[in-house]
Amino acid sequence: MLFKHICEAALLSSLGLSTLAAAETCLPEDFGGAADGSTLNTAAIQQAIDKCSAAGGGEVRLGPGVWLSGPLNLKSNIVLNLLEGSVLKADNRNNDFVAAYIGAPAKPNEAFLLANKVENVIITGSGVIDGSGDKYWWDDALELRRQVRAGNEAAFTERFPGVKLANGMPRPWFIEANEVNGMMIYGVELKNSPMWNIVLRNSKYLGVENVKITAPVESPNTDGIDVVSSQHVFIRNVEIFTGDDNVAIKSGVNQDGSAPSDDIVIENSLMHAGHGVSVGSETANGIGTVTVRNLTFDATENGVRIKSARDRGNNIGPLYVENVQMDKVQTPILVTCSYAGQSGAAGLGLVDPIESAEVTAFTPYIKGVYIKDLTATGAEIAALLSGLPESVVRDVRFENVKIDSRLGVQARYVQGELVNVDINSSEGDAIVTGPQTELKF
């Protein structure tokens, strides 16, 4: 697509390999830094970034070894290059990190690597960036989650007033772009994020390519890539193991004037443990075109899903899905206007009537779900399609879809057509419909 070439050309022309030889090279060692696994290099790395920025741009190079650091601020026209054998590892010995939250403005130190109101940034190399989530943040978040699920919601709401339970305990993000024009993350491996791994919000012309993201399945809220109110984004050749959504497309939980997320392409990638590729659940400012193609899902909880609700909806779609293979994915296709936070989609697997509600500014309207050439084996529920009485999901089209599952398609308040669709359900009918449902064969 055109925006890919614009993004890549703009970044490479300003910071790419063709210009790096002539650009400034800035080394943390020149400011007292050491990759010895014990020195805290926050100031040294930041001074290297500032030096290159002051020179009009250049390469900040991290050589082999373990670079311990607190939060860092990336500047315009900077390449952060991690050479093979280098590890950039988060260190919170001075308690410099602060918690991030999707509904709050960006603030210093809320991400390990923060690019805020800058342009033309590249994070690249063959090295590893380690967020130390296992050392500093996961245990506290898991304990708070246990308390909430045991019925003590006050443990969360009193500690984090105004933050929705579905957010999970606020913690630092790993890599964040906020109000950025042109950013590329290429080649590096990310592991052990404190919370969300890559957060792209209020930005445009962004790319994530040839990146591996790993976090244990039990790690809390460690989304792989979150796109929030951003446009012209490509995610390509990534491999993600995580404890939450592999990729999520959002636009906020409040209608605060933020832009919709739009023109998002996710392609040629492998999704392992995680909750799948999600549009939502925070969709209050709308979601435009999202394209998912040439993906493999290996034992994710969901495959491709749209999740919204009456308290966070807007116009959503179209979603294009093509050439996707799934194995041992519990629900390959899930589209719901009744998402209920940590409990998932309300009424999962059911087609019972939903009580009608008044249309509001937050009513979700999902239109355009086009799925072609999808195969899935070992599924629990082939597909869940669940609109609302006041907002039927429209323009659904499945073409060349084959799913082997325990339960078949469960559909209510949805309109669309199925062309060359083969649902092999071991229990019950291949397609079960509820109220206000029209699926043409």
Image (cartoon, rainbow, N blue to C red):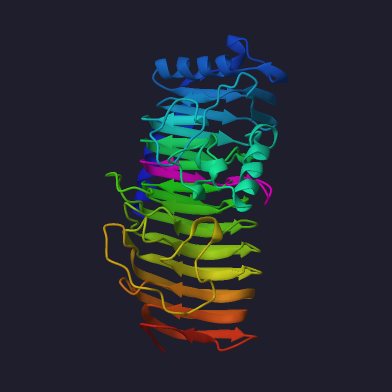
At a point 38% along the width and 38% down the height, the residue shown is 182
The reply to whether residue 132 is visible in this rendering is yes
Work out which quarter of the rendered image holds the N terminus and state it: bottom left
Q: Is residue 369 above or below residue 22?
A: below
Q: Is residue 242 above or below residue 344?
A: above
Q: Position of residue 422 (x, y in %)?
A: 54, 85
Q: Position of residue 329 (x, y in %)?
A: 62, 68
Q: Position of residue 435 (x, y in %)?
A: 39, 83
Q: Position of residue 59 (x, y in %)?
A: 51, 24
Q: Is residue 190 magenta?
A: no
Quarter holding residue 54: top left
- Between residues 296 and 306, which one lies in front from this camera angle? 306
Quarter holding residue 125: top right
Q: Is residue 371 above or below residue 162?
A: below
Work out which quarter of the rendered image holds the C terminus and state it: bottom left
Q: Is residue 209 magenta?
A: yes
- Looking at the image, how many numbered discs can be counted on the residues? 0
Task: Specify the segment rendered in magenta.
Answer: 200-221
